[in-house]
Amino acid sequence: MAEGTSTAADTRHGVLFDVDGTLVDSNYQHTMAWWQAFRRFGHDVPLAEIHRAIGMGGDKLVAHLLGDDRDTGQDADLDATHSALFSSYWPGLRAFEGAGDLLRRCADHGLTVVLASSSSQQEVAVSRGIIGADDAISAATSSSDAENSKPSPDILAAALEAGGLDAANTVFVGDSIWDVKAAAALGIPSVGLASGGTSEAELREAGAVEVYKDISALLDAFEDGPLRRLAAS
């Protein structure tokens, strides 16, 4: 075999995991933090509309909810205020049941596990502590790793690079339509979870190849599910 040529056995397979709403039960805390931030700057945005935008990066979320005619000079302050308010919820945040166990199951089957988050480095560190499975995590991204946030695919591209993966041998697990759309832009099949408050129908319509109730259901179905099939490919 020629030098530098890889075989199928050398091919690395991996799973990219979204964090908020997927591994950590935090979407509604993010919703409240954004609602409070908007109120402080004089914007009355309904909670339901904010919740449906969770999964976008902060910059995209503000533009999506306030529109192009907003005072863009407030954008950075809104994002910073949301982050400060969200930090008050950190002590009460919990990982979804089975989150750490699923990451370890993936790693035990030879899958490279990467957290594909566009949160700040500090928020990612907090989430990793809550999940408690650092022994199974090969790499993690944060907002500093991508210029554009979801639904742009930049953070997933950064996660692929961080894990030494390619899209053809990777699955992405997320809970929002923005996750699914970002993965689709890179040709990565996505597994949707309804744990973040987005329905199965919406996730499938966005392009998720399979949908589960939550991370625990995905773990229970591991042996017959998409992650085991990926590990065996």
Image (spheres, rainbow, N blue to C red):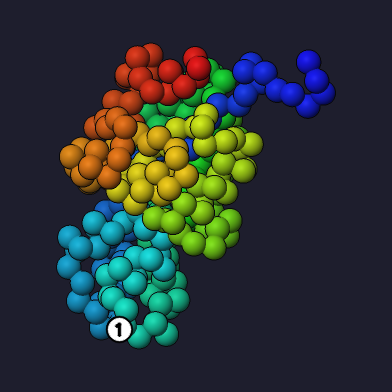
Seen at 49% across and 62% down, the residue is 148
Q: Is residue 7 left or right of residue 29?
A: right
Residue for point 31% across, 32% down: 209
Quadrant of the frame with the N terminus: top right
In front of the other: 204 or 17? 204
Estimate the x, y position of residue 166 in percent, counting from the top left.
57, 36
Outermost residue toward the front in this view = 2
**Number of callouts:** 1
Q: Is residue 223 above or below residue 5?
A: above
Judge whether 53 appears above or below 209 on screen: below
Near mark 1 (Cα within 10 A), the count class, few <14, some 14-19 or many ≥20, is: few
Camera-side residue of 107 and 5: 5
Name the residue located 24 percent from the left edge and 79 percent from the top edge: 43
- Residue 185 in percent (x, y) is at 43, 48
Using the rendered view, name the quadrant where residue 24 is placed: top left
Is residue 70 visible in this depiction of the protein?
yes
Q: Secondary structure at mark 1?
A: loop
Which residue matches tag 1? 69
Residue 61 found in image quarter = bottom left
Classify residue 105 as left or right of residue 196: right
Residue 196, percent from left and from top? 27, 45
Q: Amino acid at mark 1?
A: Asp
Most foreground residue, 69 or 90:
69
Q: Residue 84 lies in what quarter of the image? A: bottom left
